[in-house]
Image (cartoon, rainbow, N blue to C red):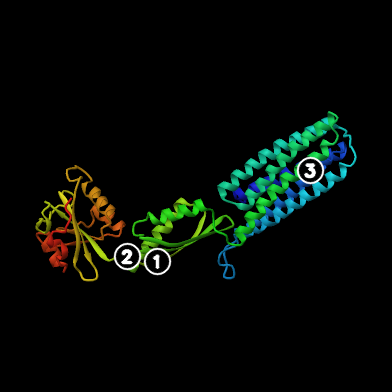
Amino acid sequence: MIRVGRDKRAALVSIGVTAFLVVIKYAAGMLSGSIALIADAIHSLTDVISSIAVFIGLKISDRTPTEEFPYGFYKAENIVSLFLALAILYAGYEIIRTSIGSAVGSVILTDLPFALSVALVSLVSSWLLSNYKLKIGREENSPSLIADGKHSRTDAYSSAVVFAGILGNYLGFYFLDSAAGILIALFIFKAGSGILKDSIKVLLDASIDYESLNRIREIASETRGVEKIYSLRARSSGKFIFIEMDVGTNLTDLKRAHQLSDKIEDRIKSEIKNVDRVLIHIEPEEREFTRYAVPCIENNGLLSKISRHFGEAEYFCIFDIRREDNDLADMRFLKNPFATLEKRKGLKAAELLVENRIDKLITKDSIAQKSAFYVLDDAYVESGETDAGTIGEAIEKMGGGSGGCMSGNCRHH
């Protein structure tokens, strides 16, 4: 059994239902003499043609990319939407032309109960069909199916106007049938112009909506390791989105930078629907200093003793060493609020250090394979060991001068 996708199945349902409405509306229009009902039948005929075009467009857009078309055939849907918009506008023109011509003389309709019944059936059917296609189109992010759903919505409005026009004729207001035809055309022009505008924007590679673009920027900015977003561009192609961005990071290791790029892409694809490709260019951003953290048992400046236990340390000494001259630029002590926890103290302490944007953790004993290590590694924080007894000795072994901190400029918190 051949399986048909939801979007294509919706297009096939639309073809069947709309073809049925064309037949009964045209028959009722001919029997009753209603110009509005015949015009509505012509309008529905354009729906049948457009639904067939949508189905063909969906089939084409699903084709696998080739060397000649490396970005796929996704825009086939937008091309279909463009022709669909032109068909809608032409239908509106024909309806106005016919309605104005019939308005010259009053037309008394016949078989009014049958005509009213057909108009009511058309109204309900078109409304339900429109809701169905719009629901599937939005869930599948199919521009052509959404456009077709909006077209069906105008059918429902048209049928409501036709019903009112025929009812008015029954009450003696014979001009209402032609007036209904003109009003239908206005609905059609409004829908057609909107679809035409959206199709042209995508075909000209216009940017996606501001809300989605801003959310993509937020996702990338919130990813650990990202220092700055230099540029961000995103465009639609059919139902899919293509994204390009330049990201600044202080990571110098090529493997780490590649991992960061993959992480950004995975986060964007998990939150933004139908993202086909994310092209990320990593720009190394040199920071003026490297920020270290060392667990301590006390807050006593450079004389503070280093703790052997990471999660149970009373304090963390956080200090910056300038990369240009390897000198100590700043130092402060951060009290560890998780030292007395029974469980997950190491993990919580690691999260605290990540929030303080450290680059490297120095400990007495290795924390490899512990929960804290994975938290720090995920945030691209390096870890190392030292045999130094105090903060001053540790800095000395790393080659960092005392700088201004020996003069009393260090901060203690």
Residue 411 picture location, percent across and down: 18, 55
Residue ID at (70%, 38%): 125
Give x and y (percent) for residue 110: 88, 33
Q: Callout 2, which amino acid? A: Leu
390 relative to 95 in the view: left or right: left
Residue under numbered circle 2: 251
Which element carries disc 1, helix, strand or loop?
Answer: strand
What's the residue type where badge 3 is placed?
Answer: Ile
Identify the secondary structure beneath mark 2. loop
Labels 2 and 3: the sequence-earlier one: 3
Reading the image, the residue beneath label 3 is: 182
Q: Is residue 273 visible?
A: no
* Disc 1 residue crowd, few under 14, some 14–19, many 20+, Cα 10 Å: many
The kind of secondary structure element at disc 3 is: helix
> Between marks 2 and 3, how big is the CA–CA gap?
65 Å
Whether pointer 2 and pointer 3 mark residues with C-beta atoms closer than 8 Å, the reply is: no
